Image (cartoon, rainbow, N blue to C red):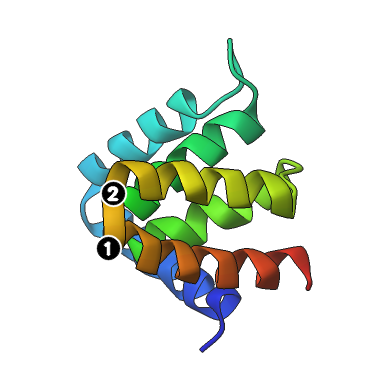
Amino acid sequence: MAAKEKLEEIRKQLQEIIGKAPEIGKFAEYVHAAESQKALDTKTKELISLGIAIAVRCEPCIMWHTEAAVKAGATEEEILDTIKVAVCMGGGPALMYGLKAYEIALEFLGK
């Protein structure tokens, strides 16, 4: 299944669980507020989140933040720089997730 399809399934699951456990919706509201443009623009925040997702090895987070970064205007070069920094922080395991992030980025970039 392509990243776009997986991400859509994750969104459906998230809405389902928020419907059954509204407290989780409060966390989602916080995330939305924290990622809103303030001192840092949305693209920068999404690239930071992508880097963290790679370093902590969260594939669903990688899909989520890659799509958001691309929608916010991130380029392939910016995503590659983000992957490089994440690998610095996360080592070999982050490198493997960085490869996955790059594959996902190319899909969302339409390449």
Location of residue 109 with respect to 83 vertically, above or below: below
* Real-space Cα separation, disc 1 to disc 2, in angstroms: 7 Å
Q: Give the class, few, some or many, for how many residues have Cα within 10 Å of label 1's Cα (few <14, many ≥20).
A: few
Q: Which mark is residue 3?
A: none
Work out whether residue 95 or residue 20 is closer to the camera in this orientation and state it. 95
Location of residue 101 with respect to 9 vertically, above or below: above
Q: Residue at x 53, y 44 (%)?
A: 82
- Outermost residue to the top: 39
Work out whether residue 87 or residue 66 is closer to the camera in this orientation and state it. 87
Answer with left or right where residue 45 lies relative to residue 109. Answer: left
Indicate the secondary structure of the residue bearing disc 1. helix
Q: Which mark is residue 93?
A: 1
Residue 44 % position (x, y): 60, 30
Q: Is residue 107 visible?
A: yes
The amino acid type of the residue labelled 1 equals: Pro
Q: Is residue 57 visible?
A: no
Mark 1 touches mark 2? (CB < 8 Å):
yes
Q: Residue at x 44, y 24 (%)?
A: 34
| Quadrant assignment, res 94 | bottom left
The amino acid type of the residue labelled 2 equals: Gly
| Quadrant assignment, res 19 | bottom left
- Residue carrying label 2: 90
Work out whether residue 47 or residue 80 is closer to the camera in this orientation and state it. 80
Q: Residue at x 65, y 23 (%)?
A: 41
Indicate the secondary structure of the residue bearing disc 2. helix
Residue 62 % position (x, y): 45, 58
Q: Give the class, few, some or many, for how many residues have Cα within 10 Å of label 2's Cα (few <14, many ≥20).
A: some
| Quadrant assignment, res 58 | bottom left
Answer with left or right where residue 63 lies relative to residue 13. Answer: right
Residue 39 % position (x, y): 58, 10
Of the 4 image quadrants, the one containing the C terminus is bottom right
